[in-house]
Amino acid sequence: MAGSRETRSELRRKPSQGRAKDTVERAKSAARQILAESGYGALSMGAIADRAEVSKGTVYQYFPNKESVVAALVAEIMDDLVESFGGRLRETLAVGSLSLGPELLTSVFAELDRHRPTLTAVLDGAPHLLPPSAFDPISERWGDATRTLLAIGARGPAEPGRARVDGDALVTILSVCGPALCLHYLSADLREQREALARTYFSMAYGGLTAAGLGPLV
């Protein structure tokens, strides 16, 4: 596309030595601090360089523009979020129980809150750098977990007069709604409703699982 700018999280130049990697980390850390303190409007390559205590040219060696720094920072935050979510998900499936479901989603909200100053600054100033697709890895893991629970659960006949829910359709709905809920949780600042949202979302998911033929696992 003509006139498009680089915003991908890939670095312009891959750091191969410890000092270079340190420079990249300092640039991302500086961007995180500026975003949290002053918002996206205060972010510039010069401001990043000053905060990181390196020359602007050094920052440009690895990032073509401030958008690419933010994209790399968002990717890093999402990686942390996915790692935390994946760990808790494995714990849930290991015991073959749905009882940790609300706590699982609460942990996602807690991780979002840990990065809230940075992420809300991005949402306010450059929402295209934090699209719903940023949460796709979490949606994929949640979808895989749903399929696993459906596979290991007892599949009895549907109750008389009650239509059976299609499992794949349920996975699609949960995968679409999850990222949207995460973004709304950030933008609307729903911290006080964290537990209630997690319980309600899980109740909806569990109702769908039951209708899809999943017997009680607890």
Image (tube, rainbow, N blue to C red):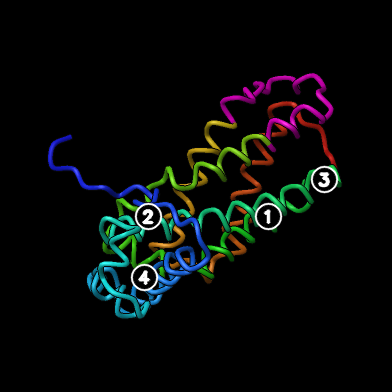
First in sequence: mark 1 or mark 4? 4
Disc 1 to disc 4, C-alpha distance: 30 Å
Mark 4 in CB contact with mark 3 (< 8 angstroms):
no
Q: Is residue 61 left or right of residue 194?
A: left
* Secondary structure beneath label 3: loop
Where 71 falls versus 207 (above or below)? Answer: below
First in sequence: mark 4 or mark 2? 4
Toward the viewer: 146 or 47? Answer: 47
Q: Is residue 188 left or right of residue 6?
A: right
Q: Which residue is mark 4?
A: 31
Q: Locate the N terminus by quadrant.
A: top left
- Residue type at mark 3: give it: Ser
Image quadrant of residue 72?
bottom left
Q: Position of residue 123 (x, y in %)?
A: 33, 60
Looking at the rendered image, the disc whose residue lies closer to the viewer, 2 or 1, is 2
Looking at the rendered image, the disc whose residue lies closer to the viewer, 2 or 3, is 2
Disc 4 to disc 2, C-alpha distance: 11 Å
- Residue type at mark 4: give it: Ala
Image quadrant of residue 104?
bottom right
- Residue type at mark 1: give it: Leu
On whether residue 144 falls in the magenta region, the answer is no
* Secondary structure beneath label 2: helix
Which mark, residue 97?
3
Quick one: label 4, few (<14), some, or many (20+) residues within 10 Å? many
Q: Position of residue 29 (x, y in %)?
A: 43, 72
Which mark, residue 104?
1
- Residue type at mark 2: give it: Ala
- Which range of residues does the magenta coloring cover? 145-170
- Point 67% across, 49% down: residue: 86
Which mark, residue 71?
2
Quick one: label 1, few (<14), some, or many (20+) residues within 10 Å? many
